Image: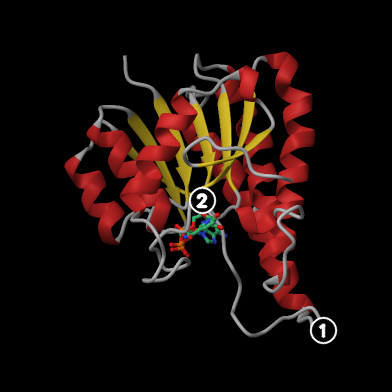
């Protein structure tokens, strides 16, 4: 019996790689993106009409999230993956000179987005047998790893870790597991061409680790290979 996964930011990078890997092994995917019809995701949707549902979703918009929830019409979601994220324009902010508009925008996508989507689709996740919500954050959000630079991005990932742990404690009694992952340093538009691993490698590791996780792992912060990361 295939499971249904929903991936935000499914049109490129790690989100697209997750979608491809899940389809390859026979799962169903709700592929959410601001434009889910064009490019590689559009081609994938045409090739997998039964297994892939393209869904328009801007994680920063209450209206867009409500419309996506309506389009799902109560469909159970076994695993919701909050993957959409931005770094913000490089060189526009620093510890000594912050562009507050940039910081606000990064928080809109990376912090408010995952909680907005998770709250809206909690009933869909609860209605499934999988009952997992995974958020792709970053080891750059770890305070314990003595951070410097990328203040907007790092603080957004630290904030989403906290927000999702509080959310995780609220949904634990409903049988929903909340998981936080660093996907590795991945060769995507965000990670750059010199990064360590291919999107397919990150996706395969994330899926295997999510498969092996449940309520016992709720509120953990781990790598794509399941190794713990200091907060
Ligand atoms: N790559 C790395 O090395 C790395 C390391 C640590 C953590 N991460 C995290 O992994 C996740 C995926 O990163 P990536 O490397 O795949 O990045 P990416 O290639 O830049 O892709 C980002 C994705 O997020 C989507 N997105 C941005 N704003 C959105 C919004 N308002 N609503 C819906 N979707 C939105 C983008 O859609 P559009 O095409 O519409 O812009 C795109 O699909 C992010 O959360 C990132 O912080 C990545």
Q: Position of residue 111 (x, y in %)?
A: 70, 53
Give above or below for 92 relative to 212. below
The residue at which mark 1 appears reads as 96
Label 2 CB-ligand 1 distance < 8 A: yes
Q: Residue at x 54, y 35 (%)?
A: 70
Side (left or right) of 15 relative to 228: left
Q: Residue at x 48, y 67 (%)?
A: 190
Vertical relation: 30 (above or below) 107: above
Residue 41 is tagged as none
Q: Which mark is residue 57?
A: 2
Query: Where residue 186 sits in the image (x, y, percent)?
Result: 42, 58
| Label 2 Cα neighbours within 10 Å, binned few <14 / some 14-19 / many ≥20 | many
Q: Nearer the viewer, residue 211 or 59?
A: 211
Sequence-wise, the earlier of marks 1 and 2 is 2
Q: Nearer the viewer, residue 73 or 57?
A: 57
- The answer to whether residue 60 is visible is no
Q: In what element is the residue under mark 1?
A: loop
Dot 1: within a 10 Å radius of its alpha carbon, few (fewer than 14), some, or many (20 or more) residues?
Answer: few
Residue 67 sits in quarter: top right
**CA distance for labels 1 and 2:** 35 Å
Q: Nearer the viewer, residue 140 or 85?
A: 140
Q: Where 220 falls versus 96 (above or below)?
A: above
Front label number (1 vs 2): 1
Residue 53 horizontal/vertical position (percent): 35, 38
């Amino acid at each position: 019996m295939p499971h249904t996964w929903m991936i935000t930011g499914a049109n490129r990078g790690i989100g697209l790689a997750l979608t491809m890997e899940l389809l390859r092994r026979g799962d169903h995917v709700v592929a959410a993106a601001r434009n889910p019809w064009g490019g590689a995701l559009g081609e994938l949707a045409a090739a997998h009409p039964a297994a892939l549902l393209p869904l328009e979703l801007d994680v920063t918009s209450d209206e867009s999230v409500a419309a996506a929830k309506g389009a799902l019409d109560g469909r159970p979601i076994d695993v919701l993956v909050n993957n959409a994220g931005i770094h913000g324009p490089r060189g526009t902010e620093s510890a000594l000179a912050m562009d507050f508009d940039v910081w606000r925008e990064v928080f809109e996508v990376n912090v408010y987005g995952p909680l907005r989507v998770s709250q809206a689709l909690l009933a869909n996740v609860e209605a499934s047998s999988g009952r997992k919500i995974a958020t792709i954050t970053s080891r750059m959000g770890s305070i314990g790893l003595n951070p410097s630079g990328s203040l907007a991005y790092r603080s957004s990932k630290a904030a989403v870790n906290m927000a999702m742990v509080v959310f995780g404690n609220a949904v634990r009694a409903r049988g929903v597991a909340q998981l936080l992952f660093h996907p590795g340093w991945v060769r995507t538009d965000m990670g750059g061409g010199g990064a360590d691993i291919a999107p397919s490698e990150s996706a395969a590791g994330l899926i295997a680790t999510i498969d092996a996780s449940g309520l016992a792992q709720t509120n953990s912060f781990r790598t794509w290979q399941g190794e713990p990361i200091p907060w």
